[in-house]
Amino acid sequence: MFFIVSKLAYFFIAPLNWIIALLIWRFFTKSLVIKKGLSIVIIVFVLFFGNEVIYTRLVTAWQPKPVQINKLGNYEAGILLGGLSSFDKYGKGFLNAASDRLVEILVLYKTKKIKKIVISGGSVYNDRPKEANYLYKTLLLLGIPGQDLIIENRSRTTFENAIYTKEIIDSLKLPPPFVLVTSAMHEPRAEKVFAKAGLPVVAFPSDFRVLDKKFDFDDYFIPKLYTISDWNMFLKEVFGLLGYKLFGKV
């Protein structure tokens, strides 16, 4: 039930969907007063959610800072969260835009910061391939020995990532803490979920979609459609964390 509610909620929190809904309402309403009011709201939404400076400032305040690998200790294992691969209709896997997670876990392993890699990720829908299985094969091709790879392929959500990973780690009696590798925007929520599940982790954010950069003149004043769309990812994490708190998962 929680899985279904969360997927529906992500549709309704998208600012672009709000703007489209308001445009449709404005088109069909016959009241000039309502039309004027809706026009103002739409303009405000576009100016706010399309502003790259506002979006960048909020996200960089939310996501953790990059971790310098030379300042990281040595750990028994690193946990690689799924979400970095996609599958076509034939079940063939491809690395997607979040594949920096794979690069970072490889760097951690190759520099001997971690001894083992726990791959956590199942399939969102029963008729899709399990992501951990695909990533396991990919890591084997990249030269990681099979004995250093641990698969958790049942999870569909971050909460399940934590619960099922803990079961496996407890059964193997691996000593904590563990390095948690996921996207920077997702790291704050994931870290809290794993802590709640009783699995101590050290955050190692990757896949920084938003950087604390220097802005050009147009970034301050000209709204951008891609920025409006980018809010989906950020609000998914913010409302996801609120929802997890509401359901007692963090």
Image: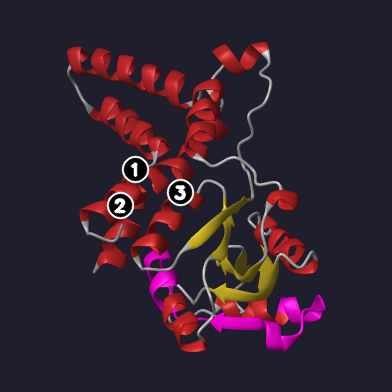
Residue 92 in sight from this viewpoint = no
**Residue 13 got which mark?**
1
Could you say whether the residue bearing mark 1 is in a helix, strand or loop?
Answer: loop
Distance CA(mark 2)–CA(mark 3): 19 Å
Asked if the residue under mark 1 is in contact with the one under mark 2, i.e. CB atoms within 8 Å, the reply is: yes
Residue 101 in sight from this viewpoint = yes
Quadrant including the N terminus: bottom left
Question: How far from the left and from the top, in percent, is residue 82?
Answer: 55, 67
Depth check: give the residue in front, 226 or 246. Answer: 246
- The structure residue drawn at horizontal position 21% and vertical position 13%, both measured from the top left corner, is 32
Task: Name the mark nearer the viewer: 2 or 3.
Answer: 3
Report the residue marked by disc 3. Answer: 188
Give yes or no for residue 183 being in the magenta stretch: no
- The structure residue drawn at horizontal position 39% and vertical position 41%, both measured from the top left corner, is 14
Distance CA(mark 1)–CA(mark 3): 19 Å
Looking at the image, is mark 2 or mark 3 earlier in the sequence? 2
